[in-house]
Image: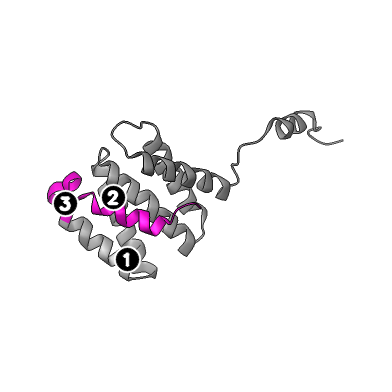
Amino acid sequence: MRFDPALAAQEAFNQTEVELGSDWNTAVELEETFSSNAGTTAREAYEGLLALAQQYPNAHSFQAFCIYITWQQVTEETIARHFETGLRLCEVYLASQKGKSSRDIECISELHRSFRAGLGLEEQDELQMEFKRDTPKGGD
């Protein structure tokens, strides 16, 4: 990757106070728990942050933060569920670029490709698609 997702998460989180209003303190507590723990405690804080993000679909910096920390979850616990969550969050984020930082769009586009690759969904080139069309299917 051409950027550090942990640093990008910090930068994005620092811009979320205005977006979250009265829930800012909750986000700070969850982020501190997530950042300073591992295992079940960190996972529960992560899930809490994602739940909070669902309440603020237009909080672009907070949405970006959640994508970056999802990549951190992938590196801690490489399971399909984290890749799927990251992919879904990226697709929602990238569906509209209005009001979003070009830096976050660039980084999240890169993460989107990484989440897809982690799930085995790399884009196929024309030759691969032709090969699959020409390969016999079925039994004898």
Percent of width and height locating residue 100: 31, 37
State the separation of the CA atoms marked 3 and 2: 12 Å
Asked if marks 3 and 2 touch (Cβ < 8 Å), the reply is no
Disc 3 residue type (three-letter): Asp
Task: Give the residue number, with chain letter if any, for mark 2.
Answer: 51
Q: Earlier in the sequence, mark 1 or mark 2?
A: 1
Percent of width and height locating residue 94: 40, 36
For label 1, the crowd category at 10 Å Cα-Cα, with few meaning under 14, some 14 to 19 and many 20 or more, is few
State the separation of the CA atoms marked 1 and 2: 17 Å
Task: Give the residue number, with chain letter if any, for mark 1.
Answer: 35
In depth, the one of 90 and 78 nearer the eye is 90
Point 59% across, 42% down: residue? 121
Q: Nearer the viewer, mark 1 or mark 3?
A: 1
Q: Earlier in the sequence, mark 3 or mark 2?
A: 3
Task: Give the residue number, with chain letter if any, for mark 3.
Answer: 23
Q: Secondary structure at mark 1?
A: helix
Q: Earlier in the sequence, mark 1 or mark 3?
A: 3
Q: Secondary structure at mark 3?
A: helix
Point 46% across, 64% down: residue? 76
Percent of width and height locating residue 57: 27, 39
